[in-house]
């Protein structure tokens, strides 16, 4: 690692900006300190929403298959990414520069992560708004338009991210466990009132609601596709590669499967795919909806903060002065929510499941194939790196064309050529293109 650090510092010149981002040996820690972060993040409205979507469109067995296969695929590339992060001690936006070039990482990663965060912000703000409107109607008999609730809570989340709120961290400590308890309670109650285990196992979705197993796999991948690429941001603090991998396989994977299956079971048992309506149907509507609102608030403040920070870095602004970009990102996110991005969840998930694995493919090809996992060969060049940019573009396009994404958009349906599983095709093409273009342009 010392050699890698030296080369990074030499490349960055006097400012040493990347070296400052690198985790110091004294800051490294073990599994028990790192794992609660991804586990807590999985207990969120977005995970429950995707689980409910799977439950509404698949049988229970197929829902489980879709989740296991989708998460299993993401785990395969996530483990390689987090091992690189543990080796270098750098966040994704920094070590992606080895595959994409410093400028390539600065712009491409910022745009991808920024758009993903804004999309999730809009979706979760919409869920939060729907939950709040249901709660106000149930408790006070006040009919608050969902769009008004969405805009209000979206604004609260943006203000929190821009100006900070020290209590938000402690709110997060309460929100995730409370939501987990409510989900466990809701799962038991919904199964008991919905005909029991037999009805759950015999459930078959109506033809008009069925989505197909491959589509379900894409949804599961889309939920954590970006996390699979950016998990190094917090797992870089791992003591070693083993700790990094253990955090993914023993922490995030089981938590994710449990949360999504809870969402699927509650959806099947209640016959409802809207997670806000599901939460309001357990006999404890206030508690469930409050947990959902608090969860989306804490997660979304982080989403818009990350988007604003990414755009700030892309524009070359000091990250300490990122308030304006965070505010603008928040307004865009609220607009997404009010415009009905929740109605386009499937398209959004498919796009994420295409872009993130392709980006990971370029990073994997650089570190694990070209450099054979040797941290001493880690190097970030200036400008754009042709093989990395070409790999990402080819991988993303392949996943979009073969994964059914264009088939969801009428004007682009002519480009839809379904084949196998889009994200898997995309990452394989990304790796192959990186190796081929590198051989043509860099190997002498």
Image: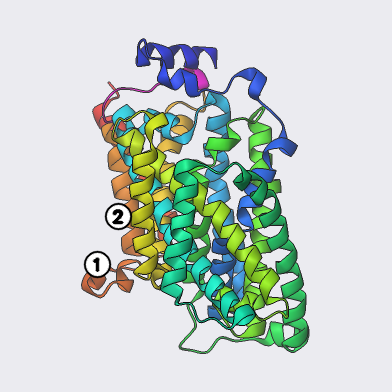
Residue at the spot x=32%, y=42% of the render? 391
Residue at the spot x=41%, y=56% of the render? 352
User: What is the magenta range?
Assistant: 375-384
Q: Position of residue 369 (x, y in %)?
A: 45, 32
Q: Main secondary structure of the magenta part?
A: loop
Placement of 174 over or under 280, stated as above or below: above
- Total marks in image: 2
- Direction from residue 239 to residue 399 in the image, left or right: left
Q: Is residue 65 visible?
A: yes
Q: Earlier in the sequence, mark 1 or mark 2?
A: 2
Q: Position of residue 6 (x, y in %)?
A: 46, 11
Q: Is residue 214 visible?
A: no
Could you say which disc has been placed on residue 415 in the image?
Answer: 1
Secondary structure beneath label 2: helix
Q: Position of residue 163 (x, y in %)?
A: 47, 42
Could you say which disc has been placed on residue 397 in the image?
Answer: 2
Residue at the spot x=25%, y=75% of the render? 410
Local crowd size for mark 2, using a 10 Å CA cut-off: few (<14), some (14–19), many (≥20): many
Placement of 288 over or under 268, stated as above or below: above
User: Closer to the camera, 350 or 309?
Assistant: 309
User: Is residue 379 located in the magenta-colored stretch of the structure?
Assistant: yes
Placement of 227 over or under 185, stated as above or below: above
User: Is residue 176 located in the magenta-colored stretch of the structure?
Assistant: no
Q: CA distance from mark 1 to mark 2?
A: 10 Å
- Direction from residue 184 to residue 128 in the image, left or right: left
User: Closer to the camera, 350 or 194?
Assistant: 194
Residue at the spot x=58%, y=56% of the render? 71
């Amino acid at each position: 690692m010392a050699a890698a650090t030296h080369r990074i510092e030499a490349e960055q010149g006097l400012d040493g900006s990347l070296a400052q981002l690198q985790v110091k040996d004294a800051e490294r820690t073990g599994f028990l300190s790192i794992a609660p972060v991804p586990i807590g993040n999985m207990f969120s409205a977005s995970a429950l929403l995707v689980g409910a979507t799977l439950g509404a469109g698949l049988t229970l067995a197929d829902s489980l298959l879709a989740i296991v296969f989708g998460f299993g695929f993401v785990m395969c590339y996530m483990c390689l990414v987090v091992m690189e992060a543990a080796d270098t001690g750098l966040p994704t936006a920094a070590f992606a520069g080895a595959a994409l070039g410093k400028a390539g990482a600065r712009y491409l990663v910022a745009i991808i992560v920024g758009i993903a965060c804004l999309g999730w912000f809009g979706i979760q703000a919409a869920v939060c708004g729907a939950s709040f409107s249901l709660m106000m109607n149930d408790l006070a008999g006040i009919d608050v338009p969902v769009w008004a609730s969405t805009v209000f809570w979206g604004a609260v989340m943006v203000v929190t991210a821009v100006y900070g709120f020290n209590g938000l961290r402690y709110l997060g400590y309460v929100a995730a466990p409370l939501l987990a308890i409510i989900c466990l309670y809701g799962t038991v109650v919904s199964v008991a009132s919905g005909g029991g285990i037999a009805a759950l196992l015999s459930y078959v979705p109506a033809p008009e609601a069925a989505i197909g197993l491959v589509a379900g796999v894409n949804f599961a991948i889309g939920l954590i596709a970006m996390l699979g690429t950016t998990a190094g941001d917090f797992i870089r603090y791992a003591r070693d590669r083993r700790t990094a991998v253990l955090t993914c396989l023993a922490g995030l994977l089981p938590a994710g499967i449990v949360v999504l299956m809870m969402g699927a079971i509650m959806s099947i048992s209640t016959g409802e795919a809207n997670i806000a309506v599901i939460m309001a149907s357990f006999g404890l509507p206030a508690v469930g909806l409050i947990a959902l609102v608090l969860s989306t608030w804490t997660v979304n403040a982080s989403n818009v903060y990350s988007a604003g920070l990414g755009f700030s870095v892309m524009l070359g602004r000091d990250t300490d002065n990122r308030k304006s970009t965070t505010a603008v990102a928040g307004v865009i996110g609220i607009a997404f929510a009010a415009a009905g991005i929740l109605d386009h969840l499937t398209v959004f998930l498919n796009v994420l499941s295409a872009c993130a694995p392709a980006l990971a493919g370029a990073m994997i090809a650089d570190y694990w194939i070209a450099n054979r996992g040797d941290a001493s060969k880690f190097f970030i060049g200036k400008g754009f790196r042709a093989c990395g940019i070409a790999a990402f573009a080819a991988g993303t396009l392949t996943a979009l064309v073969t994964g059914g994404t264009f088939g969801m958009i009428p004007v682009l349906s002519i480009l839809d050529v379904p084949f196998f599983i889009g994200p898997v095709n995309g990452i394989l093409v990304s790796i192959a293109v990186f190796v081929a273009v590198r051989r043509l342009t860099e190997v002498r």
